[in-house]
Image: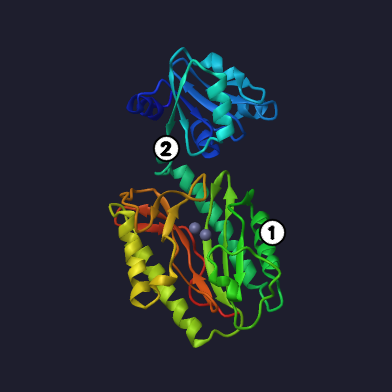
Amino acid sequence: MDERIVKLLAEKGLDALLVSGAANMRYLAGFTGEGYVVFTKRGQYVLTDSRYTVAAEEEAPGFQVIEVHKPYPEELSVLFAEDEKVGFEGEKMLYADFEGIRDGISQICLSPIAGELDVLRQVKEQWEIDRIAKAEEIGDKAFDAVLGFLKPGLTELEVAAFLEYQMKCFGAEDLSFNTIAAAGLNSAKPHAVPGAYRLQEGDFLTMDYGALYQGYHSDMTRTVVIGKASEEQKKIYHIVLEAQLAGVDALRAGLRGSDVDKVSRDIIANAGYGANFGHGLGHCVGLEIHESPRLSPKDETVLLPNMVITVEPGIYIKGFGGVRIEDTLVVKEGGSLNLAHSPKKLIEI
Ligand code: ZN
Ligand code: ZN
């Protein structure tokens, strides 16, 4: 069994572990389908239905693959001994699945664990960083392509579709998340959903998107102006850019997430827009798009070398528009390595 799992079981006083989160199943066993990865003192198993059994045998060679049948995996019951304490991911398992297992396997004690498995994924191996870097490269290529495509009259949906098409042409297996292409007043919504709105001269256009590459995500945001930027737009853009550059410059191992957040947040607050920056400065990226730790006023986690994290300040003004600029970086001793290479100077289309 994975040494880290042995240690976790000992620390939590558990006899076995039932893993159901997709990212953790993939990380710990290599399994990419639906089901459970189970660690006991007697063996390690992948439980899945017939759709994924062949894939599981290929993906998880050190694990015994057991085919299960719904509604609850009865096959689990033979894996656990009487009175064993079985940890499960309380934040990932559906309540209905929990009920099925609890009521179906009465001889065990189910005990929720919180984010302990996610913590194992915080510091990335070099091969993981390489995959994220490749995903970022795909995002950079899509940005380069979209600059030649943008023009007044396009809908936000057309802009999003173009970015998505380009990412897949450049090798993305999927999208990191639903693409954000928000123009005009919609750019004041940090997580706007693209719609039928057509780009007009004088609009901000915020594009936040990412590629999935061999299971790993990229995440980048750029904001451009359609036509000529007004003085007010230039002012807002440059405050966000200054805050983003300062956050990137500050990012290094040994600082807490809250320390880096404060560097960027203070710049925006001192410029008078503190109330217009409501979200955290950044989040880690890996097998999931949003991972811990975060760069936020509340996150006291000390950053470690080879965590991969975003720096993404923004200013959002209702009735005017918004700007966000986001890179994804590898935390290093004494600094960071930026995986995003798209230009950040104000681009007027
Ligand atoms: Zn993003
Ligand atoms: Zn992000």
| Other residues around mark 2 within 10 Å, as few (<14) / some (14–19) / many (≥20) | few
Relative to the observer, which residue lies in front, 249 or 25?
A: 25
Corner quadrant of residue 146: bottom right
Secondary structure beneath disc 2?
loop
- x and y percent of residue 290 in the render? 49, 50
Does residue 63 appear in this view?
no
Q: Which residue is mark 2?
A: 114
Residue 78 horizontal side relative to residue 298, left or right: right
Corner quadrant of residue 77: top right
Does residue 72 appear in this view?
yes
Q: Is residue 171 above or below residue 198?
A: above
Residue 259 horizontal side relative to residue 73, left or right: left
Q: Is residue 206 above or below residue 14?
A: below
Q: Which residue is mark 1?
A: 165
- x and y percent of residue 7 in the render? 35, 27
- x and y percent of residue 261 in the render? 35, 61
Secondary structure beneath disc 1?
helix
Amino acid type for the residue under numbered disc 1: Tyr
Which residue corresponds to the image point at 69% horizontal and 62% vertical from the top-left?
161
Q: Residue furthest bottom?
A: 231
| Alpha carbon separation for disc pair 1 and 2 | 37 Å
- For marks 1 and 2 on the same chain, the one whose residue lies earlier in the sequence: 2
Which residue corresponds to the image point at 49% horizontal and 87% vertical from the top-left?
231
Relative to the observer, which residue lies in front, 25 or 195?
A: 195
Q: Quadrant of the C terminus?
A: bottom right
- x and y percent of residue 18 in the render? 50, 27
| Other residues around mark 1 within 10 Å, as few (<14) / some (14–19) / many (≥20) | some
Amino acid type for the residue under numbered disc 2: Ala
Q: Is residue 309 above or below residue 275?
A: above
